[in-house]
Image (cartoon, rainbow, N blue to C red):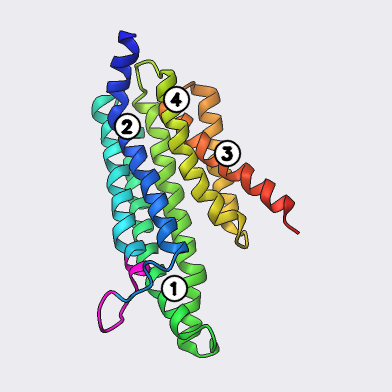
Amino acid sequence: MTTAISTLKTLRRTHQLLTAQSVVVILLSINRLTDLTLAYVAPNEFLRWVDFNNMLVFPLISTVAFYLLKKEMEYEWVGWNGRFHLSLNLTFIIGLYLLAASYGDHEVTNYLHTRFCLQESSSDLCRIVIFNDDEFSHWIFFLGFVLMNMAIMLYPLIFPYQGTVTRWDTILLVVNGLFIGLGVFANLAFEEIGLDLAVVAVLALVAVGLLVKNGRQPLFIYYTTAYVFGLVSTFIVKGLMP
């Protein structure tokens, strides 16, 4: 009993940071799928709240939580430093920048696309807006997403958790992983699938491989749950849909 309580306290901040990501997924879903945030941010109608939140508020919360999780592993878990650590830090920073750039490009052009280019899309201006909205911003988003999440997944190879992952720890990791998996599922199952499916499949394979090879590290459990659930549930729904 003493060991379990001690271990839970050690992983408490990790669970809190992963829960923050789950809350972001819920808020993103509400923001995207309801009419609650369709009002304009300012009288000049430069953006809707849905675009503003997706560009600045939610990515910032998620990024801060990712960074604090990275620092939690570096300072609270036991490990070693070296070139691999530097490489992961650079990967994380590059992924972070690309992810931020993708949100900046996508949310503004998505707003312009929706407001001005749905009916008439043949002009050069609309063609450029639509390309940035539907293609270029997605490319840099997926690249940044893969780099940042891959770096976080690989940090436990340098900073492995030394305590015991209790049953309660596992439950919390799986529950938070399922929230991310639901977000993956919502974005894949009901839209036209493209590069996003390949991205999730690669991350799922990496997560499963790390879990099988290196054992029950907290983030391996978390990422395996998230991406495998998102991938499998998407295949099931796509198979059932006409």
Rounded to the nearest whole Å, what is the CA distance between mark 3 and mark 1?
29 Å
Which residue: 37% across, 58% down?
A: 98
Q: Which residue is mark 3?
A: 228
Depth-wise, is mark 4 or mark 1 nearer the camera? 4
Which residue: 48% across, 36% down?
A: 223
Q: Which residue is mark 4?
A: 170
Left or right: 239 in relation to 112: right
* Sequence-wise first label, 4 or 2: 2
**Residue 46 within the magenta-colored segment of the rendering:** yes
Rounded to the nearest whole Å, what is the CA distance between mark 2 and mark 1?
34 Å
Inspect this view and state whether residue 142 appears. yes
| Quadrant in the picture for the C terminus | bottom right
* Sequence-wise first label, 4 or 1: 1
Residue 150 drawn at (x, y percent): 44, 41
- Range shown magenta: 41-52
* Sequence-wise first label, 3 or 1: 1
Looking at the rendered structure, the secondary structure element under dot 2 is: helix
Looking at the rendered structure, the secondary structure element under dot 3 is: helix
Q: Which residue is mark 2?
A: 14
Relative to 232, residue 237 above or below = below
Residue 152 drawn at (x, y percent): 38, 38
Depth-wise, is mark 4 or mark 3 nearer the camera? 4
Which amino acid lies under the numbered mark 3 shown in the image of this protein? Val
Q: Which residue is mark 1?
A: 110
Q: Nearer the viewer, residue 150 or 227?
A: 227
